[in-house]
Amino acid sequence: MDVGVKLPLTSPVQRLAGAGAMVAVLLLTGCTQSPAGHDERLSKAAGLARVTIVCPKGLWEETKPEGANEVKAKVSEIASGPRSGRGLVRVTMTGTDLVSYLKELDFNAHPSKWNGEKDNTAASRRVYDAVAPAIDKIEAATSPDDPEPQIVIDDTIKDKK
């Protein structure tokens, strides 16, 4: 007696549909190429009561999330002190808003090879690369007097002497 297992034959349409589903999964999971530690950064950022980012106004305008990802941030020009007159802004937001901002920065700064670079990839990468190490250094507050984190992005070209 010949005992065999008969497998159902699949039609070309079923095979094509299966292949299409696999491609869709790959596209959806390959939207960004997040750097190592990204998920841990999001968790740390979520625990902040408030954070301030000081950066050029144009850099904030270029990278701030809009639409569904918009963050609630207080933006003010730096009008006094040693950084005044340089076109810098002080952007203050909650930790949960920083999480949304980091997700937007990651999406734009680290696109998959399939998605290609965006118009603001370089600006987003610059902000992400400044914010990430600061978040990595965050520790639990030990006193109510502990300062809120401040991240400064203020590049310059030093004159040769």
Image (spheres, rainbow, N blue to C red):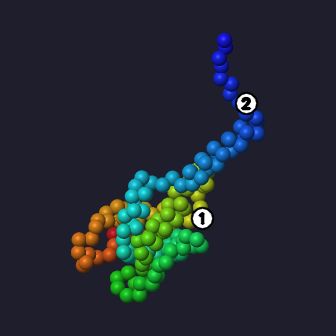
Residue shown at the point (49%, 63%) measured from the top left: 103
The residue beneath circle 2 is 9
Above or below, 76 relative to 155: below
Q: Position of residue 39 (x, y in %)?
A: 43, 57
In the displayed orientation, state which residue is furthest to the front. 1
Marking on residue 119: 1
The residue lying toward the viewer, choosing from 83 and 97, is 97
Residue shown at the point (68%, 27%) measured from the top left: 7
Residue 67 lies in quadrant? bottom right
* Crowd class of label 1 (few under 14; some 14 to 19; many from 20; radius 10 Å): few
Residue shown at the point (45%, 54%) measured from the top left: 35
Instruction: Specify whether 137 is left or right of 57.
Output: left
Of the residues shown, which amino acid type is indicated by label 2?
Leu
Q: In which quadrant is the C terminus drawn?
A: bottom left
In this orientation, does residue 102 appear? yes
Instruction: Specify whether 38 is left or right of 111.
Output: left
The residue lying toward the viewer, choosing from 27 and 59, is 27
Q: Position of residue 119 (x, y in %)?
A: 59, 64
Instruction: Specify whether 119 is left or right of 93.
Output: right
Q: Position of residue 52 (x, y in %)?
A: 39, 76
* Crowd class of label 2 (few under 14; some 14 to 19; many from 20; radius 10 Å): few
**Which element is circle 1 on?**
loop
The residue lying toward the viewer, choosing from 66 and 15, is 15
Of the residues shown, which amino acid type is indicated by label 1?
Asp
Q: Position of residue 116 (x, y in %)?
A: 60, 55
Residue 120 lies in quadrant? bottom right
In the displayed orientation, state which residue is furthest to the top. 1
Marking on residue 53: none
State the separation of the CA atoms marked 1 and 2.
Answer: 48 Å
Tag nearer the camera, 1 or 2 = 2
Residue shown at the point (42%, 52%) measured from the top left: 36
